[in-house]
Amino acid sequence: MLGQGEVSANYKGARDGVSAAGETVFDRAPNFGINLSTLRFRDPAIEDYFQIGNFSQNIALTRFSIAGGALIFALYALLDPYIIPEITFEAWIIRFGIVGPLLMAIVAFSYAPIFTYRLQGLLALSLALPSLGVVAMCALATSPGNHLYYAGIIIIIGYNNCLWRLGYMHSTFMSLLVLVCYELVVTFINPVPADILLNNNAFMCFAIGVSVFVNYIQEYQLRRGFVDKEKLRIEQRRSERLLSRSEAANRAKNDFLAIMSHELRTPLNAIIGFSEIIANEMFGPVGQEKYADYAGDIRSSGTHLLSIINDILDISKAEAGKLSLEEEPIDPVDALNRSMQMFRLRAAEIGVDLTFRVRGDIPWIIADPRLFNQVAINLTSNALKFTPEGGRVWIEIGIDAQGNFGLTVKDTGIGIKRDDVERIFEPFVQVENAMSRTHQGTGLGLPLVRKIMSLHGGTIELESEVGQGTNAIATFPKSRFVAPDAAGDIKWNALA
């Protein structure tokens, strides 16, 4: 047999993630079903947990209500000399000598460590005691007092049922007990006229029915609120666990990509280096001209694969927060001129007009030279990749209206849908259309650009329209500007 604390601990553990048996709450969904007749949860562990929490939350209000009820019951002694003068002394004995002390004793006992929700029947008894006291007065008093004081029973039952947070079944039982005792008194012990009995019973039964119904609805809503709160808590815990697992899986993926990328770069560098030696016939002719062509193909493919691996390594570092900047003053115009040289031949081969333009005076900026070039290369590569033969690509740098440095890459390519603009900044995502499926790519270029720009405190914006082209704008904040004549000192300090 499990004790009260053990049962509630089992549910609380299951609610927070792990049960006593080691299973999680996500493996066994709690049964929050409620018996509508008794208003108890079908799962004993949940009923126990609810009762403990509800009791601890409302015991202070219950004590105050009992004490307040005792005070009100005592104040009604002022009416005794006028309504039941013949038994005023006996009424005061009932009020101050029996009911009042018993109510205060119940309140005092509720502070004892052994007093738990399982003893709330005593609290419900405090509902019956004043009512039974009034029933006793009705048994002792003569007419008309013996049938007028029944109204006090209605007040007490309504007060207790509607204000105290007692269990619905407890308060209902006590209300019916009082009604039965009253019926016995006014029928057999101190009878009242039939018409008065009928009148009193009609009002008393209606008052008990209404107050019990209000108490039923109150407890039902209290339990539904508890269920909603617990379901929300369980979903929150479930979301936290899923997020934790997702983050762990993402970290494992990034670690794997970083390790594999690092391990693949070493043999790839050897492949590229030796294939270049063979293609250039640095140590003499290879014998067959096709072998030199094949070596050139190997070098080209190896260079492309190395570029992909570098992108994977950089994006993995960025997502793990390990991609750091090696900053120094750079001349954007000179850096971009050198980057554009590698694209001029390629643009000519695919029949795309490539233009590079500088607007106004361009200041030097503090940036990571390799990553700055990576931004320009990725944006230009994308523009050329998705621009058909006969199209145009413009690369332009200048100072925008806000005084920041902007790198703009515009093309007349296939464009993308507006709904897909944000999606393509997610790693390994490529927009599905006929043009993109004919081109190779990992979907890492734009996500890497966004990471790099974020590290520099800048932004990357994309404007595109299907069939009209795309406009990519990378913006570096003006806080990174540096005067050319100070660049040497800054670089020297950075190196030192």
Image: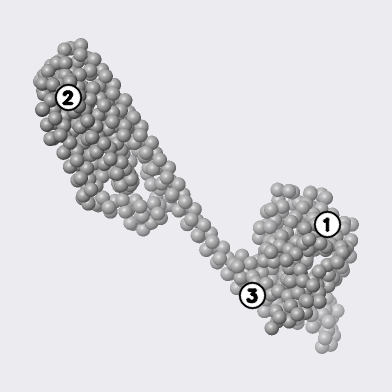
* Label 1 CA crowd tier, 10 Å (few <14, some 14–19, many 20+): many
Which mark's residue is nearer the viewer, 2 or 3? 2
The quadrant the C terminus occupies is bottom right
Amino acid carrying mark 3 in the image: His
* Label 2 CA crowd tier, 10 Å (few <14, some 14–19, many 20+): many
- Of the residues under marks 2 and 3, which one precedes in the sequence? 2
Q: Quadrant of residue 388?
A: bottom right
Amino acid carrying mark 1 in the image: Asp
Check disc 2 and report the residue beneath it: 80
Which mark's residue is nearer the viewer, 1 or 3? 1
Query: In the image, 189: left or right of 112?
Result: left
Q: Quadrant of residue 78?
A: top left
* Label 3 CA crowd tier, 10 Å (few <14, some 14–19, many 20+): some
Check disc 3 and report the residue beneath it: 262
Q: Position of residue 119 (x, y in %)?
A: 22, 43
Relative to residue 173, is residue 425 depicted above or below?
below
**Toward the viewer: 330 or 301?**
330
Amino acid carrying mark 2 in the image: Asp
Q: Marks 3 and 1: in contact by CB < 8 Å? A: no
Residue shown at the point (74%, 71%) measured from the top left: 366
The dot on residue 411 is: 1
Q: Position of residue 336 (x, y in %)?
A: 82, 69
